[in-house]
Every structure is written in structure tokens, then in C-alpha cells.
Image (cartoon, rainbow, N blue to C red):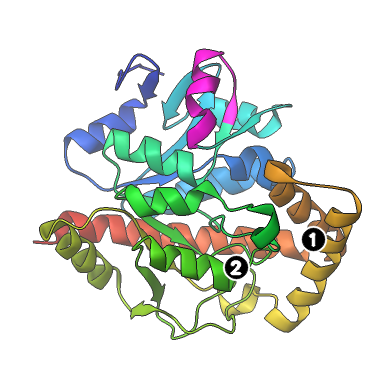
Amino acid sequence: MTTTALNPFTDIAPEVQKALAAGQPVVALESTIITHGMPYPDNSRMAADVETIIRDGGAVPATIAIIDGRLKIGISAEEREALAQVKGAMKLSRADLAFALSEGRTGGTTVAATMLAAHMAGIKVFATGGIGGVHMGAETSFDISADLEELGRTPVIVVSAGAKAILDIEKTLEVLETKGVPVVVHGADVLPAFWSRQSHLKAPLRLDTPEAIARFQATRSAIGVNGGMLIANPIPLESEIPADIMGGYIREALSRATKNGITGKAVTPYLLSEILDITKGESLKANIALVENNARLAARIAVALTLVR
């Protein structure tokens, strides 16, 4: 991979660098979904398929990760495969991104860290599965994801299936509102809940096309409004696990986490793993489907941003 230094620690893949220089659409992708979100080889296949979907949509994919102390804005197929199998990778957010660079470590970037790196490189759109947020019981644990803080200050459009359903979605929405983050549901009047198309919450805002989303972001920039935008994109109907069924699975996983004393950064990977076990693999199928669906929409938004005037 040819190195183009954004700073002394950053390598931009040639394909990504060329697209950015030409003003062509680019979509950032996170890497904790590879290192912590799915088992091998599903994580490797998913990551490759998502990059293909973005290319098919007319944009250039830029998977972001830290590999051996280098911040990669776009990775090769060989790097992606190695990342999918790496043991002991760090789960990196804004707080420890520089630590991993200074210590020569390898890690997957969370939503927060990916937003930060994407903005540094000039990438305006980022596709993920679901964002982090306010964890259940946060009123005593204070366990709130740095993703929400990053959305409040970093001007990147984040396309997701909403907040992960293992979280307190209502409190997550309240924090986003406090931080001035627009939450736009794509094509629906109800906020999605990750594996499920519907939560019990009304969509704060609704837009039905990538072009409308691009115009909204351009207008925010024109009037000097800083910060990111969250696009909540419902999982395809044929792939969802209905919320009433999923709720029981989540309660069981949360019970296991409490029983085993799981806290901090370990909570989300643990819960996803337990839900995979409880659902006998159905949650993984849904997770892959929603990530692919988000990648399709993100590519269309990235293309629309290059055309908006």
C-alpha cells in the first residue's frame, strides 16, 4: 500500500486519496465490527461484501483501522483479512486512539474514532451497523458511549440502523437532542431499533431520499451549524427480528452480563456474543443485512453530496 501521510501516523490508501483529491464520493467504514462485532469468518466476508456494495453504489470505500501503530484510511484485502483474524485487538475510541498509535498497537475503530479519522481525511459519510449510546442503568453506572459526544462535534453523516437495541434508546435519543444532533429516519415515521424495524419512539425527523439528506447537510454547513448527523435506516423487512421477540433475547443477555460482572467497553461485545448464542445465529444474519443496507444508503448519500449545490 502506498503511503500518503495526513500526519506522521496516517496512511491513506491510494484509491481513497485519488477519490478525495478528485472530489469523488467516499464512504468511511468502521473496524470494531470486524475485530469485536462478529466471529470469523463472517466478519471477513461481511467486510469485503460491504466494500463491494459501496463500489457498486458509485462510491469508494475507506475502512478505517489502526494496524501496528498506523492509522489506515482504507485497507487492502490482505490487511482486512488479517484484521478479521487478529487476537487481542484494542477497541478504540477518541480517548485511546493516540495511545494505540504511540504504542504500535492494532485495534478496531469505534463509531467515535472512525468519525474522527474520517473527518481528518475529509470524508463526509460513514456507514456502520448501530451507534453506541446510553447503556441500561446509566443513571448509576454513567456508562454512556463516546459516540454521542463525537456526533455532537464532528461533521460526518453517520448512517446506521439506529442505536444498538441493547441500549436505552430513549435516553440515547435525549442525549443526542441535548447535543444538537439531528436524528433523521430514512423513509419511516418510527425510530428503528437495530435488529428491528420499529421501536416505540417516533422519528424526530424524516427524510425519504439521499438527495434530501444531502441538501439538509449542505444547509447545516451553509448556516454554520457544526456537528454530525445520524441517519437511522430501518433494517429490511425480510431480515428483521421483531421488537417484541428481540426484547426477550436482550433481557436474557443483560441478565447474563449482570451475573458475570461485565462492565465498561466489554459490555457491548459480550452482549452481542450472548445474543448470537441465544438467537442461534439469527441476530448475526440480521446484523449483516442491516450493515449492507446501511452501506447502500451511505453510498447514495455520498454521491448526492457531490451533486448538491
Q: Main secondary structure of the magenta part?
A: helix
Mark number displayed over residue 142: none
148 vs 46, nearest the viewer: 148
- The location of residue 172, given as percent across then percent down, is 53, 65
Region in magenta: 94-107
- The location of residue 176, given as percent across then percent down, is 43, 64
Give the labeled residue for mark 1.
Answer: 275
Q: Is 73 inside the magenta-drawn segment?
A: no
Question: Which element is circle 1 on?
Answer: helix
Seen at 72% across and 26% down, the residue is: 88
Mark 2 or mark 1: name the one nearer the start of the chain. Answer: 2
234 vs 142, nearest the viewer: 142
* Residue 107, quarter of the rendered image: top right
Q: Is 95 inside the magenta-drawn segment?
A: yes
- The location of residue 20, given as percent across then percent down, is 23, 37
Q: Is residue 192 above or below residue 76?
A: below
Q: Quadrant of the C terminus?
A: bottom left
Question: Which element is circle 2 on?
Answer: loop
| Outermost residue, right side | 259
Q: How many marks?
A: 2
Mark number displayed over residue 194: 2
Q: Which amino acid is tagged 1?
A: Ile
Report whether 230 appears left or right of 83. left
* Residue 288, quarter of the rendered image: bottom right
Q: Quadrant of the N terminus?
A: top left
167 vs 304, nearest the viewer: 167
Seen at 25% across and 37% down, the residue is: 19
